[in-house]
Amino acid sequence: MADTVRVAVLGAAAFSEVAHIPGVNAHPNGEVVALYSRDLARARAMADRTGVPDVTDDLDALLARTDIHAVTVPSSNDNHYTYTMAALRAGKHVFCEKPMALNAGLAAEMTREANARGLVGIIAFIFRYTYCMQEVRRLVASGAIGTPHYVSIDSQGQGWHRGTDATWRTYAGVHGAGQLGEMGSHLYDSINFTVGPAAGFIKEVSAVTYTVPRTVTGPDGHPVAVETLDLASALVRTTGGLQGQMITSRASASANPTGMGGLVVTGTEGALFTNFTRGDNEILRLQKPGGQWEDLDLPEGARDGKPHGIYRMLGNFIDAVRRGHADPDHDGDFHDGYRSQAAIDATIAAAASHTWVSVDTDVPHA
């Protein structure tokens, strides 16, 4: 691998400018050299603002370039599979936004393709790259709260005052599982990441889901029914016997005292709480039985108001490409993405059947 990892960003979404382009360019061995979009004018305007030297609306020609080593995929959910598979077949390493795909079958294909070609595939599970989440994983594995037996995780309140205009998130064929895919993918991965080493991965779920019946204004001015899930609430069990619950909602206010989503892991000798953040305002608290919540120390920069998680996440991707594999202690590789997607699919099935549904923890063979 060359000293500099040359990256093409496949999509001129807002998060391309917020995270993907600056995150890659912040690494001393990373460089965004091209920006692809079907909307060439939008891509040119973004490239002008961010200093990307080349723009194109020809995906095949872009992926045929031998001077490009890797791609990032910040596009709408329906494009994650298509763009990722095209990039892998062209021999490019891939950093893909979450949720990994529209269903677990597609996620499995993506994982098998990357493995067969020996290419790096990483999913944008940004919370893994915060100091607080990494410290919860370490403390749980070290036995700091005894044997973990319960996990509670939620993300509510964001967007519950809903807009009136249709976006790509309105349509199931584009957005997939709605809020369950958007944030539930993060929450399921956060459970697997923090308690997995001590208590195993999510193996089964029972759930309820809900879409608030409503219409929004479509591009032509006519009303369009919202097709995607607003809320999912699930009970979970892991392979190691840990019990838990997950709630993600854009249709209800948050009851969390911090005003943000969070994770609580409870064990026989204490509990840990941490919040969801891009690394700008991290919280980590410990409560011993009979005691009060106490703040734990975190590295410098964890509370300075800057989204350090973005740069650690994209920087880790550049490092993974250079060494040829993901970091199992930090990165969410395609196998982790599959586990999260399998839990999403199982949640939808459980809500429909009113039963417990098993979750695949390993990618099936083709």
Image: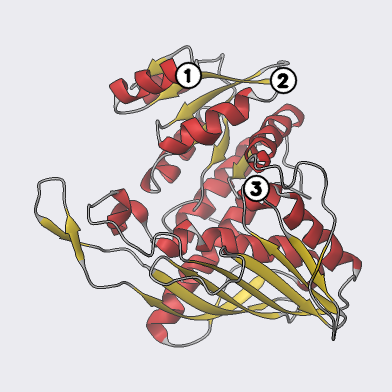
Q: Is residue 46 left or right of residue 331?
A: left
Which residue is painted at 65% across and 43% down in the image? 305
Amino acid carrying label 2: it is Pro
Distance between the alpha carbons at the discs numbered 3 and 2? 22 Å
Distance between the alpha carbons at the discs numbered 3 and 1? 24 Å
Amino acid carrying label 3: it is Asp
Distance between the alpha carbons at the discs numbered 2 and 1? 17 Å
Front position in the image: 268 or 99: 268
User: Is residue 263 shown above or below 326?
Assistant: below
Question: Disc 1 on helix, strand or loop?
Answer: strand
Mark 2 neighbour density, 10 Å: few (under 14) some (14–19) many (20 or more): few
The residue at which mark 3 appears reads as 333
The residue at which mark 2 appears reads as 28
Question: Disc 2 on helix, strand or loop?
Answer: loop
Looking at the rendered image, the disc whose residue lies closer to the viewer, 3 or 2, is 2
Front position in the image: 255 or 130: 255
Work out whether mark 3 precedes mark 2 in sequence or the reverse, and give the earlier one.
2
Q: Position of residue 130 (x, y in %)?
A: 71, 49
Amino acid carrying label 1: it is Ala
Q: Are marks 3 and 1 in contact (CB under 8 Å)?
A: no
The residue at which mark 1 appears reads as 34
Q: Is residue 163 left or right of residue 270?
A: left
